[in-house]
Image: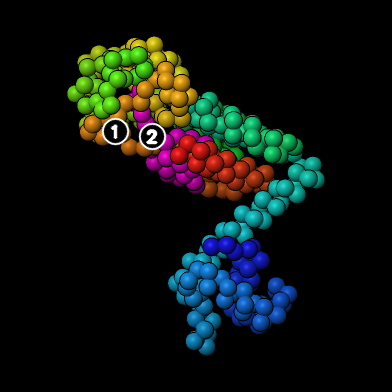
């Protein structure tokens, strides 16, 4: 659908006034103009929003659903307009963004740099830390929002999924196994496995995924605490490891690492998501940054596809 906020505001006014005629005062339009706008919305949606056969004003189920959408769009539009106005007037209230370490290293720098170029007066701070500490900081209000990688939406927070992120089995492109188009789980078990330390959130996520999808544990291997160091160990030919796709895309492109295709199927995708506390931040610039993050990361995903 291609609708304007003016049409959405008209629909909201009609629903709140429960009358086409009373809404004329609210939106400063004639009743005929209001009727035309509502009819165009219904035509584009292919559904009737208002029960015109009823004497008492009543929305259809489709109308109730669309009204919720209209409220969300208008709320976001007003928030962004307020943030842009605040920036124009010199309100430089800083936005504090949290991130899990892999996201802070591999995903956010380029995206934040792009946002900074788009809004040069906007101040942003990015803090990369453990997921548990990030959640605590969100609850305490020291972070406005966070971008993180998880296998499911966290409870007690508001989250927006940005895109799916595959967990990939990667190995040095020079390793003999890299020449195989498809690798069985039994073959995978013969290669040393580079894993993280227990208690590390990403390492635990990988361990849980391996157990859930019944991957046999290799007989030998080594533990490396740092995700980047695990990647470098794999590239050096030490063994195979599991990493998010965004951490290895450059090495795969340059053919120093190979993503293995597993015959019996790989691991379930994780989610890159924006997470906020339930309470709304009073900082008017937060909504501006959140929408910019969604836009930039969606563009990046389309380029990857």
Q: Secondary structure at mark 1?
A: loop
**Main secondary structure along the magenta-highlighted residues:** strand
Res. 118 image quadrant: top right
Which quadrant: the C terminus? Answer: top left
Which quadrant: the N terminus? Answer: bottom right
Q: Left or right: where does residue 70 sit relative to residue 253? A: right
Measure the C-alpha gap from mark 1 to mark 2: 9 Å
On screen, residue 105 above or below 79: above
The region drawn magenta spans: 147-170
In the rendered image, which residue does mark 2 sit on? 166
Whether pointer 1 and pointer 2 mark residues with C-beta atoms closer than 8 Å, the reply is yes
Whether residue 224 is visible to the viewer of this picture, yes or no, is no
> What residue is shown at x 37% (from left), y 31% (from top)?
167
- 232 or 88, which is in the foreground? 232
Q: Which disc, if any, is residue 266? A: 1
Residue 247 among magenta residues: no
Q: Position of residue 179 (x, y in %)?
A: 30, 20
> What residue is shown at x 53% (from left), y 31% (from top)?
107
């Amino acid at each position: 659908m291609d609708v304007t906020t003016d049409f959405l505001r008209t629909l909201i006014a009609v629903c709140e006034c429960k009358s086409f005629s009373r809404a004329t005062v609210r939106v400063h339009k004639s009743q005929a103009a209001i009727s035309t706008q509502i009819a165009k919305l219904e035509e584009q949606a292919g559904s009737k929003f208002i029960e015109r056969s009823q004497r008492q004003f009543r929305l259809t189920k489709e109308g109730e659903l669309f009204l919720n959408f209209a409220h969300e769009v208008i709320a976001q539009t007003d928030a962004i307009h307020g943030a842009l106005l605040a920036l124009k007037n010199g309100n430089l209230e800083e936005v504090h963004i949290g991130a899990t370490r892999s996201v802070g290293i591999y995903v956010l720098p380029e995206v934040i740099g792009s946002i900074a170029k788009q809004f040069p007066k906007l101040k942003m701070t990015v803090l990369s830390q453990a997921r548990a500490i990030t959640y605590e900081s969100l609850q305490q209000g020291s972070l406005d929002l966070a971008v993180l990688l998880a296998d499911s939406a966290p409870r007690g927070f508001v989250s927006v999924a940005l895109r799916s992120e595959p967990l990939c089995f990667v190995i040095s492109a020079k390793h003999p196994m890299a020449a195989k188009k498809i690798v069985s789980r039994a073959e995978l078990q013969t290669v040393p496995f580079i894993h993280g330390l227990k208690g590390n959130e990403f390492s635990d996520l990988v361990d849980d995924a391996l157990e859930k999808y019944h991957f046999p544990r290799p007989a030998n291997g080594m533990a490396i605490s740092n995700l980047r160091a695990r990647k470098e160990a794999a590239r050096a030919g030490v063994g195979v490891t599991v990493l998010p796709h965004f951490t290895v895309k450059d090495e795969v492109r340059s053919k120093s690492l190979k993503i293995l295709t597993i015959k019996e199927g790989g691991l379930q995708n994780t989610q890159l998501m924006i997470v906020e506390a339930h309470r709304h931040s009073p900082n008017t610039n937060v909504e501006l940054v959140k929408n910019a993050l969604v836009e930039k990361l969606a563009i990046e995903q389309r380029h990857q596809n």
